[in-house]
């Protein structure tokens, strides 16, 4: 050990008495200061503009713009310049012979020089620590543990780069060749992730071998044993290869034995790496304060109930526009979408099945007009380098599973050994892939009976099946729509009141009844209500005579007429309803609408009149504006006629309740009811409709309503604690001073120190 320390000390003296080491530190500091002040200045400016800051610690060092995220992209440029002379210098000037003739082993030579690089790496980390200390002093409730995780990742990355550079330096006496060779190895280790990904036997090995992005998890606050072991194995591999290289030179070993040792060491490293990448052998530590890199408690609860084997089969239609996400070369990246779930279910089996069948892909008809499906498949398979023999025909895939109800789109089938199954889909939005809410909802189907929403039919109600503008199929069961009930943990079914309502119906939707219920049907409904069943009731102007008999028992009535608020841009019967201050007590979705100042757009709405003497707790959720809005009792044609306020007819300008929540204790549980004065706002044609100048989130109202009506069972609540680091204790003036100090003064101090030490050495 003494010899290793002596060699390390000598190497460090050589490094710090040379301009290269100091130049790297100075350039590194200058670059890091620019990156840090840039991203930190964004937070300072945002706060000055009174924007709400969030998770400032990780924003500053991780994420997309963070210092650690960006600085790791430049480390590979610095390390080769440091390591290129470690052994090359000894080989070129002949001093290696003195080392061989001295009582020092190859292992001591290699470890001594590598220890020097580790200490130099600590110097670089020390520079980064200056920014960490500055942030700890200026960020409220600084998340230091998560940031230290990023420092650890960067240090392990530096150490791995140094080991690679040391090995390349031992291969040649030319320092420039050594540096170029190190860059080549680092480039190869970065690109190897995409090599041979279509070969299942080597897919895991090449993907594991990639060094690209290995520090990302550390930087974002998650320490994974696989990543730690990766850096240890890569470092040890190249150190051992360097020792073998010196043995070959020193003992003049034959190339057959030398290559045998090289290959043997490499294979051992690959085997250990393969073992470390097995989910069953992985360990994790979430260093973030809010555990942002871990499943939320509700999702963990679902996974903890998942005993036995679990399999996910991904069906990839070659003719589908989502085929690229399921290609063999994308399989490992696709599997990583379930990495957080593998922590709680390590034996999660994943399989990919390729087939072709009719799918709604308009571009196919434009690209291959009149071409049969099989010929289209062959052309696409040839371009995508897919083996057509492994692509199932429509007849073959239907023998296994019928995906016609899924539109033959990219879809996953989740299966347990007990036979329970569930689908997990991709969506027609910019995110495409399911998030935690959708994935956990699909898993939850496998371990529990989810709420079933019944839609009453037979009286002209809005349908949960039909696709017209006035219907409700989009939010009920439109599978490509992320926020639809079937994707958020609900099942839907039609209900005929001429028969008893099934006992498994947890929520009943009565939407815009156009024909009055018969006495028998009312008895069926009242029986459901008396048993504590939950309801969502939506009405429309002109249908009060059909709807009021249903809701009068709750002390609520749809007022005659139609609410209006004339504007220059929209129809006068378009009501932009704002959330009341009490909505947060009902659902956090409504609370988010209130805090975000999102409205509920109601195109044709009846006002709601209510009393509180029927045993229900009544909470107004949304109201019309207090000014310029009244209940129009005369005009019925809002397209051709002009509305006018007429107090003589009983029209009153005031705020009107448009949505109510009612609740009461009955039968040992809480009955919950939501009543709306408009049925169009959540229809297919209006739920996502965009109107210029109006901030509306009608689909959020649907999620919030069913979250409350299901007793918070679905959608799954994936909220996390709000990070407390939401403020910086520095203004723009202070930031300007800090920028001068970090970019200018700090770099100048290092330059002076470098010149001073270099000058003293020359003087000696």
Image (cartoon, rainbow, N blue to C red):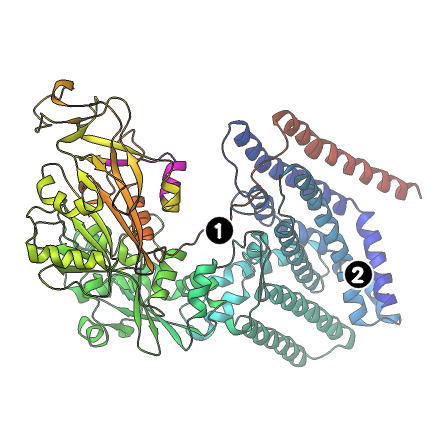
| Cα separation between marks 2 and 1 | 56 Å
Looking at the picture, does residue 252 appear above or below residue 452?
Answer: below
Helix or strand or loop: what does disc 1 sit on?
Answer: loop
Give x and y (percent) for residue 731.
62, 28
Give x and y (percent) for residue 595.
41, 37
Give x and y (percent) for residue 530.
22, 57
| Residue depicted at x 31% and y 59% | 489
Q: Is residue 600 magenta?
A: yes
Looking at the picture, does residue 22 appear above or below residue 172?
Answer: above
Q: Is residue 615 left or right of residue 724?
A: left
Give x and y (percent) for residue 481.
27, 52
Q: On the image, numbered disc 1 is attached to which residue? A: 720
Q: Is residue 52 left or right of residue 505?
A: right
Residue interval drawn in magenta: 590-601
**Which residue is more in the foreground, 669 or 324?**
669
Looking at the picture, does residue 146 appear above or below residue 749?
Answer: below
Label 2 or label 1, whichever lies nearer to me, is: 1
Q: Is residue 517 magenta?
A: no
Is there CB contact under 8 Å for labels 2 and 1?
no
Q: On the image, numbered disc 2 is attached to which residue? A: 90
């Amino acid at each position: 050990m003494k010899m290793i320390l002596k060699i390390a000390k000598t190497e460090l003296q050589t490094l710090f008495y040379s301009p290269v080491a100091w130049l790297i530190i100075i350039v590194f500091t200058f670059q890091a200061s620019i990156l840090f002040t840039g991203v930190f200045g964004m937070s300072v400016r945002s706060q000055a503009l009174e924007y709400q800051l969030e998770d400032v610690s990780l924003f500053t060092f991780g994420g997309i713009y963070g210092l650690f995220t960006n600085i790791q992209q430049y480390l590979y440029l610095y390390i080769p310049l440091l390591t290129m002379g470690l052994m090359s210098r000894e080989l070129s000037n002949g001093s290696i012979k003195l080392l061989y003739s001295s009582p020092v082993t190859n292992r001591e030579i290699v470890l001594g020089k590598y220890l020097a690089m580790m200490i130099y790496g600590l110097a670089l980390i020390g520079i980064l620590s200056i920014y960490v200390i500055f942030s700890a002093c200026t960020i409220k409730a600084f998340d230091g543990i998560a940031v230290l995780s990023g420092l650890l990742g960067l240090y392990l990355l530096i150490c791995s780069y140094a080991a690679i550079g040391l090995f390349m330096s031992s291969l040649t006496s030319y320092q420039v060749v050594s540096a170029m060779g190190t860059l080549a190895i680092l480039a190869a280790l970065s690109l190897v992730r995409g090599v041979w990904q279509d070969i299942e036997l080597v897919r895991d090995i090449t993907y594991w071998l990639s060094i690209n992005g290995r520090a990302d998890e550390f930087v974002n606050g998650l320490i994974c044993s696989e990543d730690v072991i990766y850096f240890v194995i890569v470092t040890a591999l190249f150190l051992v290869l360097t020792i073998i290289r010196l043995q070959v030179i020193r003992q003049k070993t034959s190339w057959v034995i030398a290559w045998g040792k090289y290959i043997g060491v490499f294979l051992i490293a690959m085997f250990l790496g393969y073992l470390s990448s097995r989910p069953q052998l992985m360990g994790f530590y979430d260093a973030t304060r809010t555990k942002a890199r871990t499943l939320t408690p509700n999702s963990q609860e679902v996974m903890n109930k998942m005993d036995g084997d679990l399999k996910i089969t991904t069906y990839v239609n070659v003719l589908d526009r989502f085929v690229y996400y399921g290609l063999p070369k994308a399989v490992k990246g696709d599997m990583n979408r379930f990495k957080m779930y593998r922590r709680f279910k390590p034996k999660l089996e994943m399989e990919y099945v390729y087939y072709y069948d009719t799918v709604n892909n308009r571009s196919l008809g434009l690209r291959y007009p009149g071409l049969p499906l099989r010929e289209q498949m062959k052309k696409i398979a040839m371009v995508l380098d897919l083996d057509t023999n492994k692509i199932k025909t429509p007849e073959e895939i239907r023998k296994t599973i019928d995906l016609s109800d899924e539109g033959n789109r990219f879809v996953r089938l989740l299966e347990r050994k007990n036979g329970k199954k569930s689908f997990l889909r991709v969506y027609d939005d910019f995110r495409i892939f399911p998030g935690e809410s959708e994935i956990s909802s699909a898993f939850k189907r496998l371990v529990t009976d989810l709420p079933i929403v019944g839609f009453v039919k037979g009286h002209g109600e809005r349908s949960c099946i039909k696709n017209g503008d006035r219907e409700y199929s989009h939010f009920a069961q439109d599978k490509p729509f992320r926020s639809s009930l079937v994707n958020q943990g609900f099942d839907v079914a039609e209900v005929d009141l001429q028969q008893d309502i099934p006992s498994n119906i947890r929520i009943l939707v009565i939407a815009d009844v156009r024909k009055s219920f018969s006495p028998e049907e009312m008895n069926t409904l009242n029986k459901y209500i008396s048993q504590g069943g939950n309801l969502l009731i939506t009405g429309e102007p002109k249908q009060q005579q059909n709807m009021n008999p249903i809701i009068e028992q709750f002390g609520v009535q749809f007022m005659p007429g139609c609410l209006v608020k004339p504007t220059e841009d929209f129809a006068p019967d378009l009501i932009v309803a704002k959330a009341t201050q009490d909505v947060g007590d009902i659902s956090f979705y409504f609370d988010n609408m209130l805090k975000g100042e999102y409205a509920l757009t109601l195109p044709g709405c009846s006002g709601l009149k209510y009393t509180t003497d029927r045993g229900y707790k009544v909470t107004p959720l949304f109201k019309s504006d207090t000014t310029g809005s009244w209940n129009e009792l005369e005009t019925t044609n809002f397209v051709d006629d002009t509305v006018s306020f007429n107090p003589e007819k009983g029209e009153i300008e005031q705020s009107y309740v448009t949505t109510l929540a009612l609740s009461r204790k009955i039968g040992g549980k809480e009955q919950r009811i939501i009543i709306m004065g408009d049925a169009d706002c959540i229809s297919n044609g209006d739920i996502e409709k965009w109107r210029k100048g109006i901030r509306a989130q009608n689909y959020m109202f649907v999620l919030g309503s069913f979250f409350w009506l299901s007793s918070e069972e679905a959608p799954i609540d994936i909220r996390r604690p709000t990070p407390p680091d939401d403020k910086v204790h520095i203004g723009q003036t202070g930031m300007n001073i800090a920028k001068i100090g970090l970019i200018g003064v700090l770099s100048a101090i290092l330059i002076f120190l470098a010149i001073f030490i270099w000058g003293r050495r020359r003087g000696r």
